[in-house]
Amino acid sequence: MATILLDAYDSFTFNLYQYLRQAGASDVQVYRNDKITLEEVIALNPRNIVLSPGPGHPREDPGICYEVLEHFQGKIPILGVCLGQQMMYEHYGGSVGYAGEIQHGKTGIVTHDGLGVYRGIEQQFPVTRYHSLAADPSTLPECLEINSWTPNGIVMGVRHKEFAIEGVQYHPESIMSENGLAMFRNFLALQGGTWEENPGCRSADDVTNHYPGLQKTDDGSVVPTPSAAASAAASSGDILSRIFAKRQGDVAAQKAQPGRSMAALQRMLDMGMAPGQINFAERLRQSPGMAVLAEVKRASPSKGDISADAVAAEHALGYARAGAAAISVLTEPTWFKGSLDDMRDVRRAIDSIPNRPAVLRKDFIFERYQIAEARLAGADTVLLIVKMLSAAQLRGLLDYSRLLGMEPLVEVNTAEEMKDALGVGAKVIGVNNRNLRTFDVDISNTADLAAAGVPSDVIVIALSGILHPEDANIYKDTPVSAVLVGEGLMRASDKQAFVSALQATKND
């Protein structure tokens, strides 16, 4: 049985190969991570798998790495190095962003917890780092623990609590990193796919994480310290990472309020306290011509203030009377100046209108809590953004939304993300014409992705970039059947005329 090394087009892959062989791996087979399929890897019957370093962001060019993690977890040991470790972190629900410093061939000290690949290794030693991105500790998934860190708290490695899956941010295969061979020997010694199968490597009872950026709460859970969360939010590089980090803190604070825990929300749902709902997908299909999702949007990161003092209920009522099929309400408070109260107000304002529009909670959703509070506040649907969710997260949140009677709007931006959305069975897919990492806009993006074989029973919606009704003409002869418009409608003096003109772009 071979060790499979999945190469992310990195010059250190050869070093990794050499170290694995020196550490005792008799058969190391190297494959580019986008030139081999999951089925081919399965057929190789690997003993263990290593995900190599590589350039870029872990969500940009992952090849089959996320599929490999999903399939082989719990079956065989998996080790991630640098980019490979970042993929692990994002796959299980964490966020990777700017580390706050750029390291290229620099040596520094790491501290570790003495478990897993660190068994029998001195607790502090020098390693070589080549990275500008790192795991955001404020988004640490429940299933992972931080196994190593720098003196200033940057995450240098993570470990799965159940499966024999571990990663390091630095390069143990570098000649200037100490203990690299010992770490690879520890990895190669692992059997099976769980820590339970490897006595002494990680006790099932050992749930204490020694990372200084985490603290225990009164109920025994482990959360980021306020300073660590603030530091992570401030240092993240792109806007999506910064928003995500901030929302993590917002949601944690909300759940800490008396009577607002997830258990409390579930009890309220069980009591039948959520307002009545309508079928989001069917409401879109009922719309004449092009269905219009009209958005309540006070501001945005790219445009700043649009209508900072806007009364959400007033705009929503105008949209409903103009014939909108759905009303999208931004509930993110920092960059978009929205709130869940806005959505409650919107719902009350339109509730008595015959065949009212569906209400969409548009936010950066990463856990069930946000979906539960949306439903209690009157949402008919929620937004799930593929770019910020692992495959497991996306599937779990979609299933939970449907459990509450809501078909979610699943947002994609690339062909790969469209494949992911279709793979989990999404029935309403929005194509964002705006890249959430660069904020560049291309309104042809929706038409291009919709033309690439989307099933006929899937509703495709164009998101972002529609400032004038004529902009939607590009979708006239495409599978696109709905558009979401925010800034253009917020600024429009005649919302009725604007909505009617949009609907007409799809009439025969």
Image (spheres, helix red, strand yellow):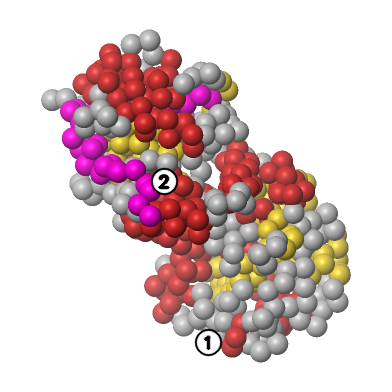
Does residue 202 appear left or right of residue 66 in this picture?
right
**Label 2–label 1 contact, CB within 8 A:** no
x then y, percent, for residue 49? 56, 75
Looking at numbered disc 1 in the image, what kind of residue is underneath it? Met
Residues 355 and 200: in front is: 355
Residue named by callout 1: 1
Please tell me whether residue 304 belongs to the stretch shown in magenta: no
Residue named by callout 2: 376
Res 406 label: none
Does residue 166 appear left or right of residue 283 in this picture?
right
| Magenta extent | 271-299
x then y, percent, for residue 152? 83, 54
Residues 161 and 64: in front is: 161
Q: Is the C terminus in the top left, top right, bottom left or bottom right quadrant? A: top left
Does residue 506 appear left or right of residue 150 in this picture?
left
Q: Find residue 225 and report its image quarter.
A: bottom right
Looking at numbered disc 2 in the image, what kind of residue is underneath it? Leu
x then y, percent, for residue 227? 77, 48
Can residue 507 be seen at all in this image of the molecule?
A: yes
x then y, percent, for residue 352? 27, 29
Q: How crowded is mark 1: few (under 14 residues within 10 Å), some or many (20 or more)?
A: few
